[in-house]
Image: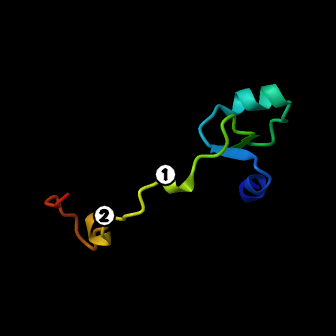
Amino acid sequence: MMLAARELNIGSVLVGLFDPHIIRKEFSIPEYIEPTVLLILGYPTNGFLSPDRHKTERKPLEDTVMYETYKEDRSL
């Protein structure tokens, strides 16, 4: 849904931290249905942010992944 929304120039945000009791009450959802995630859709006021805003240079895998043992001494 999020990809389809983006194709239509609709923004989306997935929300996973909320009180399901409030959602049930506000949307008249029966007790036997458990809301687990909310998908918020809308049109961005100032358009979408550029995907070029992210730094494209990545850290080497060795700087972020540990194999078999934990190492405290890591160069940053």
Amino acid type at mark 1: Arg
**34, 64: nearer the viewer:** 64
Quadrant of the snapshot with the C terminus = bottom left
Residue at 51 percent across and 56 percent down: it is 52
Residue at 79 percent across and 26 percent down: it is 25
Q: Which residue is mark 1?
A: 53
Q: Which residue is mark 2?
A: 64
Instruction: Evaluate whether residue 40 shows in this view.
Output: yes
Q: Report the side of 39 relative to 60 (left or right).
A: right
Q: Position of residue 9 (x, y in %)?
A: 76, 49
Instruction: Determine whether label 2 and label 1 are within 8 Å by CB.
Output: no
Residue at 80 percent across and 36 percent down: it is 31
Mark 1 element type: helix
Quadrant of the snapshot with the N terminus = bottom right
- Looking at the image, is 35 positioned above or below residue 75? above
Q: Position of residue 24 (x, y in %)?
A: 78, 31
Distance (Cα) linking label 2 and label 1: 22 Å
Residue at 67 percent across and 42 percent down: it is 47
Question: In which quarter of the view is residue 4 placed?
Answer: bottom right
